[in-house]
Image: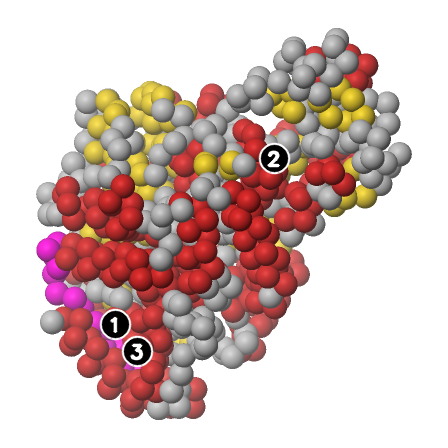
Amino acid sequence: MCIDLSLQRSWTEEIPIDDLELYLGGRGLNGNYFLEKISKLTAASSSENPISLSVGPLSGSLAPCSGWTSIAAFSVSNAPRYAQVSMPGHWGPQLKFSGFDQLIIQGKSERPIYIAIDGEKVRFKDGRPLWGKNIEETLVGIQEEEGRNTEILSIGPAGERLVRFANVTNGLSWTADHIGLGCTFGSKNLKAIATHGDKPVTLREFDRFLKLCLVLRERIHRDQKSAWLEGAGSFFFLGQNGGGLGIKNYTESSRVDLEERWKAEYLKEYLYGCEGCFSCPIHCGRISRMNGSYFGGVHLESAWSLGPRIGIFDWEKTLKILRICQMQGLDPSSLGSIVSWLMDCYEKRILSVRELGLTECPWGNEEAVLRIIERIIDGKAGGEILREGSLDAARALGMGLELVPHFCGMDLPVRDPRFSVEYALGRALFPGEWDYLQSFTSGTPPFSSTPSGFGENKIVEKISGLEKLRILAEMNSLCPLVVARLALISGFDIRELVLAATGTIGDTQALMAAVYRTIQAEKTLLEENQAGELDPFPARFFENAAEKSYLQKRIKDYDLYKESHLLLKDKVKQ
Amino acid sequence: MTDAISILPDLCTGCQSCEMVCSLSHEGVSSPAFSRIQIKKWPEICVCMPIVCQHCQDPPCMKICPTGARKRVAKTGAVITDANWCVGCKSCIYACPYGAPVIHPDTKRSITCDLCDGKPLCTEVCTAGALSYCDDKFAIEKKMVFAQKIASLLRLK
């Protein structure tokens, strides 16, 4: 399905069967589309740049954890380039039930609109009554008009006002973060995409597919890791061996006891229930309760970004800020990044009160955070600089650049790279990836029947294998956490499912070739559209002497970590 | 009273696995529209509600059906629609206190849960524990309590 917003026209195009065999779907289809049809970005903020939203052959089926959607665009966040993100939730399956594997949106509408897709019918609806509304008001407004079973992908005021780190949200809980997609939607005057379909997803061998799914779901449900994830959501990663998450802009790192306390308080005082992505047997999404209201979308990354990362250890304050962030359509991680950078600069007296336009900005100050959000949304009183993100704000102000935690222009997730060789190398090998769980790996490379060696000389091989597995998951609309990080679905399982679903694609060699093609397509796109130098981690991650002594106790071979990371940085630059 | 699918809406996470397994096992395709169980969602109050036939002891759908298409299966106690007799008038939908029957998108006739011949697959895939297969004497009472909760939450908004 292709939609041109400038002409307010939609049409369908058959995806060549060769492309489906070569790239499977999801992330692969997106890479192929951009490589074949677009190749070069027109301008970083150009509304003409297309957005591609794709699902894979397992989307909209009983296959466990098959609710993910791959989205690709030329990112407007810090380093403009080809960027892709996987979004959990329910929107992708609805696209599939409408009868489509891919939605391409191009052009720019003259006035605010939202698109309503109902099967093959596409309507361009007046978005002006919704313009300025927050995510919840938008969702309820559209669902009351289009039906309660319609899945909504929308932006909040942040996206409308072109904040560079605005996100898009499916429903109220599932977001596509990190690539500034909300800003791209906003620049196209696109408030939302409402999708609903009744078309059945056909499966080549449905009997076999049903049996495979039932066995796999049972196996996932019985696995201990699922039980942990069901119990504590993504917070279960905390406290086991010390997550090693950055506190106060990475001036400190978390210890086991602090993580345990922080997690326990949430689970005891604020956790209300679970929410699940489409066809997920695990339900790691958390519903929180605070002051009589309920809301979802709380997970480790978002909560830590707006909690300890900015010096707030009070859950009530964190949830309040997170709720505002969700409603405005801001990426919580990038917001945490800029707030923690500002507070760090304030503490070190790099920025004065005058430059900040703020009265005070100490660690953990809720009022300061709320003022910063307000200014970012309004784009006034310093907000016009802050809304560009921490790296560009530091560049614009000409100060505090060395305190910006980023990697290749992307805001760094809350995971402290000093804590894990795997994580640091993963960053270096896959700079375009954004996955704060990169170091929490327990999976095996695709199609390996036994766990790979985990000696120091095997680390790169293992990381590379896991990233391929992740890409394979994203090509099939499966959850990358469940597939690559927790190894609850193996490459063999995916092969069997795809074979039963399509009847044509499913040969191991063909699947791996599709993964390599996708990697190659993305690599070409990245090389052709790289705006600046691939910056490494900020120097502070190698120079903090106080931390080093602590880290040396945690990382067996700190010098090897440092050396190998620097080597790989050079490799990335080449 | 026979066994039926008991619902605990507070535990439903809205994953729709029940819909998928139902449509796949009955129709050979994946689609919520072809499922005999339906999930209704109110995301703004974090509520998901599975809706499925409760196979009432004294089913109003059987009473109102003008052609006698709604019948009880002796083996399982399930109240089902005989597609040979159903004319798609939707009377059963209006009569049902649960809003359970749906119209099949292709045949345009009413479809409801048939308890999968005594082993409902939806209860097997519901890992959240919202669905279970048992003798639920309090189905109506539970539904009323939950309806009141939804009404109360929506009014708060």
For the residues carrying marks 2 and 3, which lies nearer the camera in this image?
A: 2
For the residues labelled 3 and 1, the Cα–Cα distance comes to 10 Å
Q: Residue at x 53, y 22 (%)?
A: B105
**Chain at numbered mark 2:** B
- Let me know if residue A530 is in the magenta part: yes
Marks 1 and 2 share the same chain: no
Q: Which quadrant is the C terminus of chain A positioned in?
A: bottom left
| Residue topped by disc 3 | A460
| Residue topped by disc 2 | B26
Label 3 neighbour load within 10 Å: few <14, some 14-19, many 20+: some
Q: Is residue B101 above or below residue A561?
A: above
Q: Residue at x 35, y 91 (%)?
A: A557
| Residue topped by disc 1 | A428
**Stretch in magenta:** A527-544
Q: Are marks 1 and 2 in contact (CB under 8 Å)?
A: no
Horizontal side of B46 relative to A539 (left or right) equals: right
Q: Is residue A439 above or below residue A270?
A: below
